[in-house]
Amino acid sequence: MNPEFEEEIFASESLDTGLWKRILGLLATSKKRMILAMVIILGETCIGVTLPLLNRHAIDVFYTGVGTTQDIIRFALMYAGLVALQAYLIYQFIYQSGLIEMDVSYNTRQNAMKKLQNLSFSYYDKTPSGWIMARVTSDIARLSEILSWSFIDLLWGIFMMVMLTAVMFVTNWQLALVVVIVVPFVYLVSGWFQKRILRNYRKTRAVNSRITSGFSEGISGAKTTKTMALESMHFSEFSSLTAEMKSRSLRAIILSSLYVPIVILLSSLGNAGVIWLGGNLVMQSLIQIGTLIMFTQYAGQFFEPLRNISGILASLQMAQASAERVLSLLHTESDLTDSPEVIAKYGTILEPNEAVYEDIVGDIEFKNVDFHYNPEEPILKNFNLTVKPRQRIALVGETGSGKSTIVNLICRFYEPKSGGILIDGVDYRERSIGWLHSHLGYVLQAPHLFSGTVKENIRYGRLDATDAEIVEAAKLVDAHDFILQLEAGYDTDVGEGGGRLSTGQKQLVSFARALLANPSIFVLDEATSSIDTETEAVIQHAVDTVLKEKTSFIIAHRLSTIVNADRILVIRKGEIIEDGTHAELLEKSGYYHKLYTNQFNETMQDKMMSEL
């Protein structure tokens, strides 16, 4: 998937009020703090409007010598008290905003992680990991910052401008008009800049996603890069991306840096108008000097939030791209879900009701199943297959024939487009995804281990397993001996992705992990294709002994590993063209016979060459 293409789906060039209504929904968990913050800023605004009124009173009364010393002392104490209260409210405002930012960030990341756990394989098939990482990290961080600080600042600015406007028009409508007449011009300037800022920032975020994806791929594929001497090519591509991001970021920065000064210039013109008109009114004795000074203070207070609002609107424009991306993740609907009736009984993937989970005997049936990833390229058409309990089924065929698709449909990583798959006589969609997955054991071609110890990785198969059960599972797959030879035995750290173990060792650990769950259905997906022959023999022995009482499916490239299977299905273009035991298929002298003979001859030639 091209991240920049998806970014262009978000085409609005102005503040999308509908989008921001949904974004404000993220503040629901901080509702009490938001209300408290609004009360705080309302109180601080009232004080901010009151202080210039007190200044006018002091100038018009005390400057003319009308007030007494006691009046001045009382006035000073009241003024100091208001300033102290204002300082405290500002402290509370900063404190509450910080708490809101942490709440929004925490809850949004929790929701994003929950969503990612529920999305099906198809989402990960088309979405790069770097693209997801950019959403969960930088995009959520920017969005939580905007919702906490900028949004509350915006409320403060609106409160301040509304209250100031009311007081100014009550005091002198002429001077008030000079102040507020600037607002339409600021609005027009803002509209012009907002479209361009958002457009440039969207492009910046698109490039940032590609950079994040490049980082992720560069780290995970570092060994491949070095073995193929591709360092210069990757560095050149990365340099090109960072240069593009720098260029686009500069454009956005230039627009933002022009935007705010222009608003300040307009504000200054309004302030100058107040001084000019107010000065004339004072000279004509139509207003007192205290009123003029109050209006100059009000003009400064009015234009400060106006400038802030302009800056906040610019920030909102830039954050809108991040908001669109975060919400697109949070609102992504999985194409693999349980029905409400199933959820009511079995629970969800994250909150399962395991007490009602039925056991699986292992009878599996495909009934007229159609499936495709792309509607124009069908994989299975009217596919039928019946598997009896405890049968060991091997699937062979050329790449793209549909072997992995059949297994993935059995595991309900995908669902049929039409037809049905029955487990123990019941359509598996009548039971939950979690129910089926809890009965699965799956060993991949490229085993993945999590950071932690060998023991912890095996325990992932069943989190409540005892140490003795972990050791027993390792012994079943002949992994116990090599584990004991590690520096700390079962407590040895495997490194990120299991990087401190060999491929064969990782495969044995993942095999033990799958067995620990005591699954009813077991899948080996090309599990021996990337390991040495010695480890292959170990796994083959484990398969022959451990999987006798389980319904199992083995996708095999090396046909020597499936000669003991109960049934071998030869798949070609989504159809079963041959079905039987190893001996039966060899006797037919068909496609399987050809595959096995060619592979046997290649193995013998390799062996002879190695002995020379």
Image (cartoon, grey):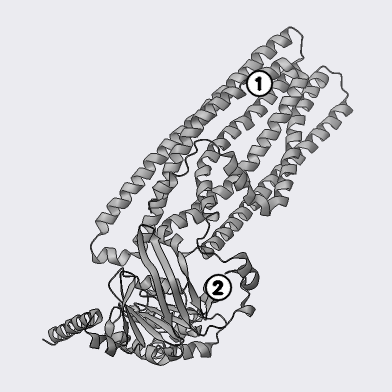
Which numbered disc, 2 or 1, marks the residue that appears first in the sequence?
1
Q: Residue at x 54, y 62 (%)?
A: 113
Question: Callout 2: helix, strand or loop?
Answer: helix
Q: Amino acid under label 1?
A: Val
Task: Compare residues 269 and 212 and report the one nearer the observer.
Answer: 212
Report the side of 478 relative to 582 (left or right).
right
Q: Is residue 509 visible?
A: no
Q: Residue furthest top?
A: 284
Residue 594 image point, x, y percent: 20, 80
Q: Residue at x 14, y 83 (%)?
A: 605
Mark drawn on residue 179: 1
Question: Callout 1: helix, strand or loop?
Answer: helix
Q: Which of the 4 image quarters holds residue 307? A: top right
Height in image: 303 above or below 490? above
Residue 38 image point, x, y percent: 72, 43
Q: Is residue 258 visible?
A: yes
Q: Residue at x 50, y 76 (%)?
A: 422
Quarter of the picture containing the C terminus is: bottom left
Residue 205 image point, x, y percent: 44, 46
The crowd level at tag 1 (other Cα within 10 Å; few <14, some 14-19, many 20+) is: many
Rounded to the nearest whole Å, what is the CA distance between mark 2 and mark 1?
Answer: 64 Å
Report the side of 274 relative to 522 (left or right).
right
Discs 2/1, front: 2
Residue 387 image point, x, y percent: 43, 82
Q: Amino acid under label 2?
A: Gly
The crowd level at tag 2 (other Cα within 10 Å; few <14, some 14-19, many 20+) is: many
Mark drawn on residue 480: none
Height in image: 134 above or below 75? below
Quarter of the picture containing the N terminus is: bottom left
Mark drawn on residue 434: 2
Q: Which of the 4 image quarters holds residue 216? A: bottom left
